[in-house]
Image: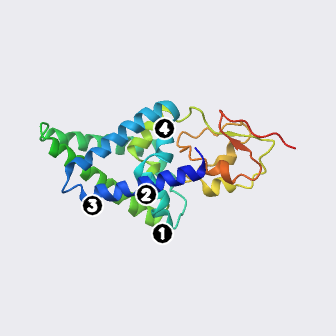
Amino acid sequence: MGMKQREWIQWALAPIVILVIALGWRYPWLGFSVPLVMLMGLIGGMIRGRYVCGNLCPRGAFFDRLLSRVSPRRPIPPSFRNGVLRGAILVLLMGVMAFRVYQNPTSVTHWGRVFWMMCVVTTAVGIGFGLVWHDRSWCAFCPMGTIQSLLGGRRKALRISAERCIECRRCEKVCPMNLPIVSHKAQGVVDEPDCLRCSECVTVCPRQALFWPESLPQRDV
């Protein structure tokens, strides 16, 4: 996916979050957009890790296109990536959602309201952290992001050419997840399960040192 194409897709997806949060209390069926995105993430995770997070997630699009404009974009705290914390949040949120659904399992309206409330609460947390640290802070410990990284975070990983890379670190400056891309220069593969496959780093690299496995870097002339 080209950067212009990704940008336009995200601009189209970002309003979905606003629409669901603003109207979901009145139209609970809008809440079903939450499990739909979750299912899309699960399927995408098995194919290409967190690709959906970086390109097709409405909330991720909201963070990238809107929240980023007011975020101080400070580095994401390393503690947010702690495996124990991420596992605990995953169990907690999935458990709360399952418990709330169980309270009235035969009501479709109830299900929709549960999904809507989960969207409201988690988006509020994401916005709060985004206003303090980085717009993608939530994505460092998002339960669905954690699942996607576990399912296929290392599949079709980004490649880095040691010969081409001049360690200017422009790639790291634009990486929405603050990943240490250059540190993988020697091994030639950016072994980061939380890579969003957004291609921001590929686009800004002045030496075309970064590329996806299905692509080959152009030859020097």
Closer to the chain start, of discs 1 and 2, is 2
| Amino acid type assigned to the residue bearing label 2 in the image | Phe
Closer to the chain start, of discs 3 and 1, is 3
Measured in 3D between alpha carbons, the distance from the residue under mark 3 to the one under mark 4, in whole angstroms, is 30 Å
- Marks 3, 4: nearer the viewer: 3
Q: Residue at x 66, y 48 (%)?
A: 202
Measured in 3D between alpha carbons, the distance from the residue under mark 1 to the one under mark 2, in whole angstroms, is 12 Å
Indicate the quadrant where residue 101 lies: top left
User: What residue sits right under mark 1 in the picture?
Assistant: 70
Q: Is residue 95 left or right of residue 185?
A: left
Q: Nearer the viewer, residue 157 or 94?
A: 157
User: What residue sits right under mark 2 in the picture?
Assistant: 62
Closer to the chain start, of discs 4 and 1, is 1
Local SS, label 4: helix
Q: Residue at x 70, y 55 (%)?
A: 169
| Amino acid type assigned to the residue bearing label 1 in the image | Val
Local SS, label 1: loop
Q: Position of residue 198 (x, y in %)?
A: 56, 47
